[in-house]
Image (cartoon, helix red, strand yellow):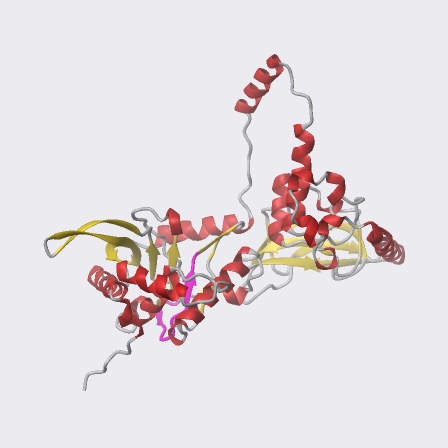
Amino acid sequence: MSQFVFKMPDLGEGTVDAEIVAWHTKPGDAVTEDQLIVEVMTDKAAVEVPAPVSGRVISITGAPGDKVAVGSPLIVFDVGGDAVAVAAETGAAQASNAESAEPSAPTAAAPSATASSPATVSPSATASPERQGRVMASPANRRRAREAGIDLTTLAGSGPGGRILREDLEAAGAGDTAAGENRPAPASGATARGRADVAAETSEIKVIGLRRLIAERMSEAKRTIPHFAYVEEVDVTELEALRHYLNLSRPKDAGSLSYLPLVVMALTRVLESFPQCNVLYDAARGVLVRHRAVHVGIATQTPDGLKVPVVRNAQSLGLWDVAAEIRRLAERARSSKATREELVGSTITVTSLGKLGGIASTPIINAPEVAIIGLNKAVERPVVIQGVVVVRRIMNLSSSFDHRFVDGYDAAAMIQALKELLEHPAMIFIPKVKPT
């Protein structure tokens, strides 16, 4: 028996270990080269690791949630002649099965069929004979399948190359639901017992992957950074009028402009006068790294948890460029397509809860940054202006600063400067007049 020991690869600069998110093979399985064997996560990104050779799996290291050091054995293969032959035969059989199954591919993959009601799709319309080998699906869809108890090997993906899409998972889930609805209802006594059983049930969810990473970073930020919170009320009546006018001037198929790009544009202007807030703290060296360029992190809620894609060099972009970049990055983050470079390197973060914005919030700083700006919900309410009660559109800005490096006075002065620009939005686009 000839063995090949595959070690945890170096997945990026500074990576010392990686967390096992999900295994896609087990001891005794025959795998082919480039077949997906494991999903891992570093502090920077999620990575799908393919098999480096063909052979039979002898042993694996670690369970989901365990961390394996870079350079440590991850999986051991038997790459002897027999094992390689078995793996090759397995790959050939998979290809043959795929070819024979192709003529009877489910019509639900066609655009006209996917537009129909999911409740009319039966499990047989999306299932295929259980297959081995690499299943084409994104990490987000793999997670959804695990949570729904769906075996990906039983689905025929409707995406390119048989890739399993979210619609395929929803169709499979709808089929299970429909099947459940057709089952006879239990007797009343059984129903009561069932409800009692459900009430007594608990479930344990292991904190792994992105959720673990978020938990660690948030805990570290609150533990090590003395947060100074500052909330200011902003009259965004004129900003809303400008936003509405700009949206009317755009083609209907263009994305609608939100407050976020306007706030980012104003922030880039304000940071010219408050460079101490556009800073990264290198704790290992005890050094503040001040940036001239403004790389704005946009806190984005995704199915996998909170991600912060980065609008780079925002100070050099126009309003529509900023808006388009925010939309592009948010979509890539939500579909788990964002690259490591798109998720790191921000110098200040903006976060918004949109319609759920509430009155105020206390955002946690995205270390190693020293400031974060939060947008709350904009609402119309009566205010007094020069002794007259009028209705204005009001929004609160919630901000947090690292009090070790940003004094309270400077933090308040920065938010006041941002407030002035948002209340008089034309000033965002007028170049500053340099003193003579």
Q: Residue furthest left?
A: 387
Please state if 420 lies on the left or on the right of 164 as rendered.
Answer: left
Q: Position of residue 115 (x, y in %)?
A: 65, 49
Q: Which of the 4 quarters of the picture holds residue 409?
A: bottom left
Q: How many marks overall?
A: 0
Q: Residue furthest bottom?
A: 436
Query: For this rendering, which residue is in front, 328 or 120?
Result: 120
Q: Please give the range of residues in magenta.
A: 282-299
Can residue 21 be spotted in the picture? no
Query: For this rendering, which residue is in front, 364 or 430?
Result: 430
Query: For this rendering, which residue is in front, 383 or 160?
Result: 383
Q: Position of residue 359 (x, y in %)?
A: 29, 47
In the rendered structure, does residue 377 fall within the stretch colored magenta? no
Can residue 8 be spotted in the picture? yes
Rendered residue at 69%/25% (across/down): 183
In the rendered structure, does residue 291 fall within the stretch colored magenta? yes
Please state if 149 lies on the left or on the right of 243 as rendered.
Answer: right
In the rendered image, which quarter contains the C terminus? bottom left
Query: For this rendering, which residue is in front, 431 or 129?
Result: 431
Q: Which of the 4 quarters of the picture holds residue 323?
A: bottom left
